[in-house]
Image (tube, helix red, strand yellow):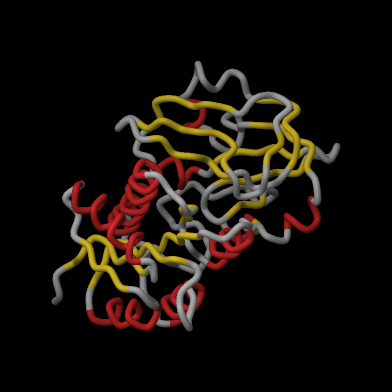
Amino acid sequence: MSKVIDILVVDDEQVVREGVCRVCEASGLTIDAVGDATSGLEKLRKSSYRLVVCDVMLPELDGFHILGAMKKEGMRTPLIMITGCSTLQNAVNALKDGAIDFIPKPFTVEELESGIRRGLRYQELAESAAVPGSRGVSVPGFAKPCPPDCFRLGRLSWVKMEQDGIGLVGVTDLFLQTVSGVKDLQFLGMGRDLVQAAPCATITSQDSLFHEILSPLSGSIVERNEQLPSHITLLEREPYSAGWLYRIVPVNVSFELGNLISCTQDS
């Protein structure tokens, strides 16, 4: 059996490949790096990896081709998408298609390290639970399922539409498990506008890494769960009830809900 390598990075920009390699090697991780989708898939078919970090825009075949081929061939390796596009739509599409996370370009060393640590933690949880790391778009068996009346942005955050048209926003149990313990939570300011798939809050984990929570919907904040920063365990114990983050007045809700995954399949 081939040796398991920690990371496969697929990006056509040499400077990005070298940057990811430096960060990973500084953390004691092993890494392979290639510049196109065909080479990436060849690597995946010949070797075992714990995590794939893949650019959306690649020569000839893009990152969605890799994601689709991995799903078709039953590859269990979790994949994080990198996107340098001016819109967030590619990131939203990648999360809906099965990517476990995305990292925007240009990224900082801290953003890259946090994303990779979440991805490796995801793979560890999946292996320990004997659950494939890439099982369609459903929530793996090691995580609490999102309630059926909610919609989620990939495996990262969720929204529940209340009767008055207000959206209740929170973070998934799966995301919380991958950050390895919550130490602190920072909200956006009241009256700020959320943008779908853009950061809406920041978690500091017990290992002092910062993890940005991505908003499932766009809208204006009308209420924050002010008890959370001083009762942070609520976030982990009850992520789908008392651990909610915001109430928002959503915009373009019909279109944006179409970018999300119904949690009816998670129960």
Please name the residue shown 45% across and 49% down the image. 143
Residue 14 on image: x %, y %: 33, 66
Taking 43 as reference, is 243 above or below it?
above
Q: Residue furthest front?
A: 15
Residue 243 on image: x %, y %: 57, 30
Residue 176 on image: x %, y %: 44, 40
Judging depth in this view, the residue of 131 and 232 nearest the camera is 232
Quadrant the C terminus occupies: bottom right
Taking 228 as reference, is 197 above or below it?
below
Judging depth in this view, the residue of 246 and 115 nearest the camera is 115
Judging depth in this view, the residue of 245 and 209 nearest the camera is 209
Label tally: 0
Judging depth in this view, the residue of 150 and 205 nearest the camera is 205
Please name the residue shown 36% across and 41% down the image. 110
Residue 16 is left or right of residue 150, and the answer is left
Q: Can you tell which quarter of the image residue 159 is in?
A: top right
Q: Can you tell which quarter of the image residue 69 is in?
A: bottom left
Residue 250 on image: x %, y %: 78, 42
Please name the residue shown 29% across and 66% down the image. 8
Q: Is residue 226 visible?
A: yes
Q: Is residue 264 visible?
A: no
